[in-house]
Amino acid sequence: MNKVELLAPAGSLEKLKTAILFGADAVYCGGLNFGLRAGADNFTVEELEEGIEFAHQRDKKVYMTLNMIPHNQELAQLPEYIEEIKKLKLDALIISDPGVFAAVRREMPEMEIHISTQANNVNWASALFWAEQGAKRIILARELSRDEIKEIAAKTEGKVELEYFVHGAMCISYSGRCLLSNYFIGRDANKGDCAQSCRWEYHLVEEKRPGEYYPIEENDQGTFIMNSRDLNLAEEIPELIELGLSSLKIEGRMKSVHYAATVVNTYRQLIDRYYEDPDNYEADPELLAELRKISHRDYTKGFYYGKPGAEGQRYESSSYLRTYDFMGVVKDYDSENKEAVVEVRNKIFKGDELELIVPGQKTFTVTADYLLDEEGAEIEAAPHPKQLIKIPLAAEVPAGSLLRRQKEN
């Protein structure tokens, strides 16, 4: 059985390394041009080189997005950009526009190409068309049910790989092809600059009654009529694998390091446990609960069981649910004194109960009975981001492990 790929977002070099350390088989990231996450940190050529080397040393892959839908003026810059990325040892490029596809095929004939979800791939004929053009993989639209995926997989078997989103934010437009942001404030979602206008608060105004705002529902604070819940298909791992998918994709290049570590670690363990014993597999409730500890909106299974109704939206608010704070990153371990060296991200106090997220393991709790600064002096709190401190830790954990703290009610 070929093991399904776990594909993780990498919005920065730190997130790339975090996703790899916590078990991603591959990551996808954007360069400084032609990607669809202008708000992410994105990568310079030098950072891409470092990230690719880090991944390849661990037998992992790096895919780069080239999935913007360019107008003529942007297209004129494409040849120069292709020349820049030619020297990179990328494993694939993610593309949605046929013109960009043709240019890459012409200038980089050996490069593996994945067709972006932005290309709205919702049927087997479209998948076969792209396969005939030389695409290696189709990233299926989120708007597909399991039955539709199964049919596409059956009719494309052996001809093209299929990738499907299993976790993260959903879009109210068709596979992200949205004009709202551009219409309202001139920020083009199809060029990577979406303002998430769908999550704003809206009221109804009648043409001849300007200034009179009517709530669309009973809530006098307005309603969030296009505010989709977040996708979570962690419970569907066995069926997703058995459908014939090659890759399970996590959304979230603009999410935090804590998000990347927690989601990847959870899906990694669920996938591995399935392959260890498919016939007796049961999703571990403790692992599933991890996905409620990251910043997220209420969860939905999206289109997986058919078109979602009202339950697919959250009408009362567009805010995230945040029950934990990301506190720090383990950078080293002092085995002689049994202390972890921690780079602080949020203020840590002496006596804090912290959860430790370790690659490939279930989360466990540690107590910061004391804190030491870089000179070895005891301190009551570590308030400065990037500050290095030591906390007691009975057993060694790998560098890159994360600490978080539950918020007070």
Image (cartoon, rainbow, N blue to C red):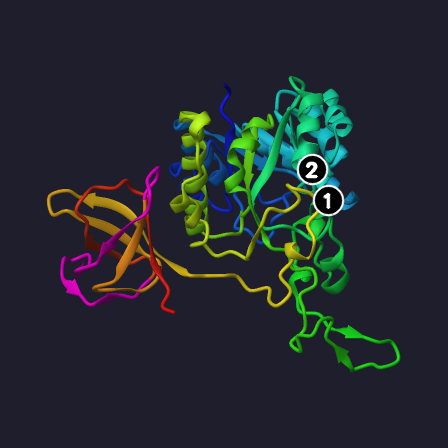
Q: Quadrant of the C terminus?
A: bottom left
Residue 161 % position (x, y): 62, 25
In the displayed structure, would residue 381 be above or below residue 190? below
Determine whether, in the image, residue 114 is placed left or right of residue 328. right
Q: Which residue is labeled 1 in the image?
A: 74
x, y percentage for residue 102?
74, 28
Query: In front: 216, or 309?
Result: 309
Left or right, 81 with reference to 216: left
Towards the viewer: 73 or 11: 11
Residue 166 vertical position relative to residue 25 in the rendered view, above or below: below
Residue 17: x and y, percent?
41, 40
| Residue at figure coordinates x 69%, y 37% from the top left | 78
Residue type of the residue flagged with mark 2: Leu
Q: Which quadrant of the structure image shows residue 99?
A: top right
Q: Assign a secondary structure to mark 2.
A: helix
- What secondary structure predominates along the stretch shown in magenta? loop
Q: Residues within 10 Å of mark 1 (few under 14, many from 20)?
A: few
Residue at image x 50%, y 52%?
Answer: 255
- The residue depicted at 68 percent of the width and 61 percent of the height is 197
Give, as a single range, the part of the protein colored magenta: 358-384
Q: Which residue is mark 2?
A: 78
Cβ–Cβ below 8 Å for labels 2 and 1?
A: yes
Residue most extreme to the left:
336
